[in-house]
Image (cartoon, rainbow, N blue to C red):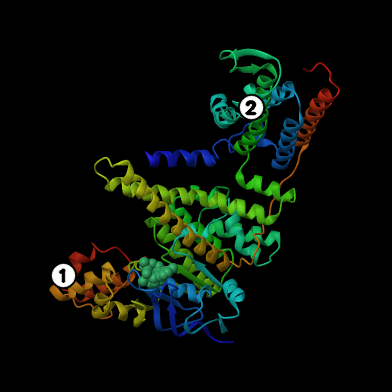
Amino acid sequence: MLSSFLKASKEIVYNERFSLSNGFLQSIDPRVKVFSFTAFILVAIVSKSILPLITLVTMTFIFSIASKIPLRFFTLRTAFALIFVALIALPLPFVTPGSPIATIGNNGYLISITSEGLFKALQFVLRVWACITPLILLTLTTRFSSLIHSLERFRVPRVFTNMMSVTYRFIFLFIDEAYRMILARESRTVRGESCLRATKALASMMSTLFIRSYERGERVYLAMMARGYEGNIRSITRMSINGRDMIFGFFAIAMCMMIISLEYLHIGVV
Amino acid sequence: MSDLAVDVKDVKYVYPDGCVALDSVDIRVVRGERVAILGPNGAGKSTLLMLIDGLYRPSKGSVHVLGMPTNGNTHKVRMKVGLVFQDPNDQLFCPTLWEDVAFGPLNMGLDEEEVTRRAEDALKAVGLYGLKDKAPHHLSAGEKKKATIASVLAMNPEVLVLDEPTANLDSKSRIELIGLINNLHRRQRITLVVATHDLDFIPMVADRAYVLNRGHVVAEGALEDVFSDSKVMEESGLEPPTLTKLFDLLNRFTGFDAVKPLPLTIDQALHEIRHYLAKSRLEPQVRRAVPKES
Ligand SMILES: Nc1ncnc2c1ncn2[C@@H]1O[C@H](COP(=O)(O)OP(=O)(O)OP(=O)(O)O)[C@@H](O)[C@H]1O
Ligand SMILES: [Mg+2]
């Protein structure tokens, strides 16, 4: 049971299947993508009404289809986080003051759902959705290495990007190590175990895993020094922006400007 | 300039947990020599290699590499010594294979053009050029091993130190690795130190051997002599190469009398058999069954 969970998590952490296919976004320069998608997210954060959010989500979905990502997969992946967001938003309709549209309970103890509250909850969920869809789409269509390099180009501190790439590499090793330990245990467990014993075993396994990872870290550091590492990871990258990338970038910026200006000029929006 | 590539003098190494991994170890490797470090699991082979690369500091004694003491010259020593770790997962940490191979040369401060050229050459040498954009964790175990070898070759080391290089390699890759190592040795006079317990492999890549057991050097000398010393071999739990065993049995149970030291490689064995056949009365019939030496 645990082992299949780990296998699934490996799939989820990072799957390079889509980033290597030849869809639309895959062919766009990673820096342009990082820039445009950050702009989308910013718009999602500052926009006050629902329409811009819907526009953003729709646009991201259109891009995902153009990038040959299966619609069902993408919807599930983006909707997964929304379950938690929805839980957080649940009380909003009840606690926001405004005009009630439904009332529960009898005299004295009334709980009412307000239209303002419903609007707020919907807006909250949509806003989070509009923020995570571009992020997920970005990681799905960009190789991790290119993502790191474009972050470096945007002057994200080296310490941070180095840490990200090493973490990324060793998450897999960590999962594999845990997977092997669990398999080894499962293969030696004949009958079903009591819940208590299984929990205890899990706790001891976690500590072993921690020590192993710590020692692995030491050895990796030694191996890096063996190849002349002295504190920062250097890299060579060749990225070039062509006309297509420019057009995509301009389009993205234009979209963002349009959404913002429409909203602040109160033209035809709620 | 010292003509010793590696000079380990009376070294003791104690791990932080108190485990004495090496004690009074003396090892000398001349420039351009090919030396094997043999020994069972836990003998201290990997520990010794870490000391040679200046990654560990000896608890007692000293280690000199190319005339420099490793203490105080760690960076210089590591640029000259290329160490391939036993576990490739310790060594590959970049998002792509190409970056991993370029990591060493970049740290040497070479310009981009040179780094690119070296990384490409190294990847081609181990036959992984086609996988250069792959993520290391998606490589097979044997491919990872080859990748680590490439990552070290790209630094153009003067001393190549390999820890269990044949682990996980299939027989074709093993042969290619032997060819690669010997090419480097022949063309650049690279010094080789190979730790392994794969004794069928070692005669192709080394001339001299040290046998380690429980942290001590228990034997040293030409490969043939070390392998013929059945007492040391048995005590250290080492199985002689298949060919050596075969000729030992032939000597004991048939009229065959191969001269000691016993043959280690196919070529030596062929030579021995030819020699025997030439003397033998059966020569005309059997001769046809033995292929010509290539
Ligand atoms: N990080 C460590 N901490 C404590 N003890 C260690 C550590 N690494 C190795 N040892 C101990 O040092 C001894 C020598 O280990 P070493 O790894 O050098 O052996 P080896 O000859 O390379 O074995 P193998 O053939 O299995 O690779 C062993 O007894 C081992 O238990
Ligand atoms: Mg070892």
Label annotation for residue A125: 2
Residue A256 x %, y %: 78, 30
Residue A33 position by quadrant:
top right
Q: Check disc 2 and give the amino acid type.
A: Val
Q: Position of residue B81 (x, y in %)?
A: 54, 73
For the residues labelled 1 and 2, the Cα–Cα distance comes to 92 Å
Label 1 is placed on what type of residue? Answer: Leu
Q: Which residue is mark 1?
A: B282
Residue B250 horizontal/vertical position (percent): 18, 72
> At 64% across and 27% down in the image, what residue appears?
A125
- Up the image or down, B72 lies above or below B149; here it is below
Above-or-below relation of B210 to A166:
below
Q: A204 and A253: which one is in front?
A: A204
Which chain letter goes with mark 2? A
Q: Is residue A216 left or right of residue A23?
A: left
Q: Name the quarter where the N terminus of chain B is drawn.
A: bottom right
